[in-house]
Amino acid sequence: MRLIWNAHLLYWAHCFLRNTSYAFTSGEAQLLLETPLTALHQTLGAKLVPFAGYSMPISYPDGIIAEHNHTRSQAGLFDVSHMGQVTVIGDSVAERLERVMPNDFISLAPMSSVYGLLMNEAGGVRDDLIATNLGDGRFNLVVNASNKHEDLAYLRAAIPDLTFELHEDRALMALQGPESRAVMARLGKTASGLGFMTAAHDQLNGIDVWVTCSGYTGEDGFEISVSASEADRLAQCLLAEPEVEAIGLGARDSLRLEAGLCLHGHELSADITPIEAGLNWAIARERRESGSRPGGYPGAAIIHQQLSEGATRKRVGLRVDGRRPVRAGETLLDNAGTEVGVVCSDAFGASVGGPVAMAFVQPACSQAGSDLHVMVRGKRVDLTVVKLPMVPNRYYRG
């Protein structure tokens, strides 16, 4: 059993390292940044790896499979302080943010959040993010760690009449899983009552926090922004609750893949449109060709065309027939041996009991049940297209 578990751990770690971006160039290690929780990760025995320029925990001593399963059954605490937390300030913030994203920010209710796409002129995605209307004329953005400085530079140039303030004095942690709401109810006052994609100020065990009901696992949960000076105390308070365990980025990746959530640089990029990625729902009705405020953001004409005519490739989920994993970047073939797509992410899906992946394929091969395969070292590995998400999302909507 120990040998089997170690094999799974090595495979999963290999998937994570291959599916993510690391801070090494020309064979020379860069100086890695630390989050306010790095010392705590070391105390907890985390395996730290470079990720987006930071030293981040990929796993803890119990291992990635145990962490994955714990998050699905109880509550997992993730350090996501490497993400960019940005406040947007100025006149007519909602209207001006619509210059660069296909969202309906004007109608977004105070203390509500929405999934946003920062677009380019080719219809691709510079970054995906969560935007929250703070209710006082300001918005908050949470952007991907590897893109945050490029995002800021672009936003400041594209919308110079707004101020974009990056909060490097704050930590961000995610409490995810079916027991996370009970934990929040014991420690806080209001956040436990939040529905999916809403937000509130609260105190957890007397510590001031900003909370959104959101996450990257497909589970009910919360993302908690806290002053860097209070981060360690808050994390230890949360970890003292019997349902909560520390979870690394390895399990975060496998959880999001099972949940059918995109990873920028894999299922989204400057060369991949939201329509190709199956994110039609992220294009607000008001911003579509027939809407009340059509277009007005980079790449709108391409998005309108793809919404009308369809895209030439589609994102799908894949289950591997057997235990042999597939790798991101491998070519997908149909039964005639014709190239029909490419794998974009892979992991060991603990909840579904085997290797899983996401891929882009030709529309004719995108239906659930379609049989595909890859060739790995001269051997055929069969896969089946499956519906996303692979496990049901369990967001609490009130």
Image (cartoon, rainbow, N blue to C red):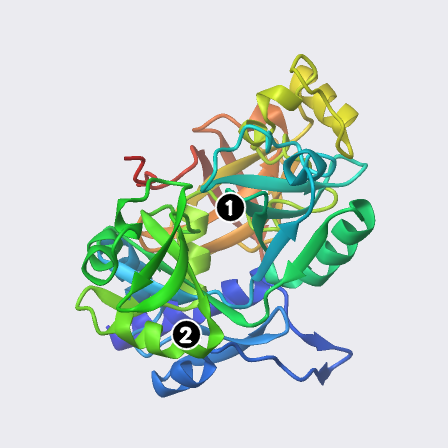
Residue 222 as seen in the image, left or right of residue 303: left
Comparing 381 with 397, the one in front is 397
Q: Nearer the viewer, residue 199 or 118?
A: 199
Residue 134: mark in rendering: 1
Q: Give the SS element for disc 2.
A: helix
Q: Quadrant of the C terminus?
A: top left
Q: Which residue is mark 2?
A: 231
In this view, the residue farthest toward the top is 290
> In which image quadrant can residue 59 be found?
bottom left
Relative image position of residue 261 (x, y in whole percent): 48, 44
Residue positioned 59% across, 40% down in the render: 116
Give the x, y percent position of residue 254: 42, 56
Callout 1, which amino acid? Leu
Residue in the foreground of this view, choosing between 327 and 228: 228
* Amino acid type, label 2: Ala
**Which element carries disc 1, helix, strand or loop?**
loop
Task: Tell me how many marks there are.
Answer: 2
Q: Is residue 324 visible?
A: no
CA gap, disc 1 and disc 2: 22 Å
Q: Relative to 290, say whether 163 is above or below.
A: below
- The percent position of residue 163, horizontal first and vertical second, equals 71, 53
To which quarter of the image does residue 194 belong? top left
For marks 1 and 2, the one nearer the N-term is: 1
- The residue that appears at 29% across and 69% down in the rendered structure is 206
Mark 2 Cα-neighbour bin, 10 Å: few <14, some 14–19, many ≥20: many
Q: Is residue 198 left or right of residue 362?
A: left
- Frontmost residue, 317 versus 380: 317
Query: In percent of the image, x 66 and y 23: which residue is there?
Result: 287
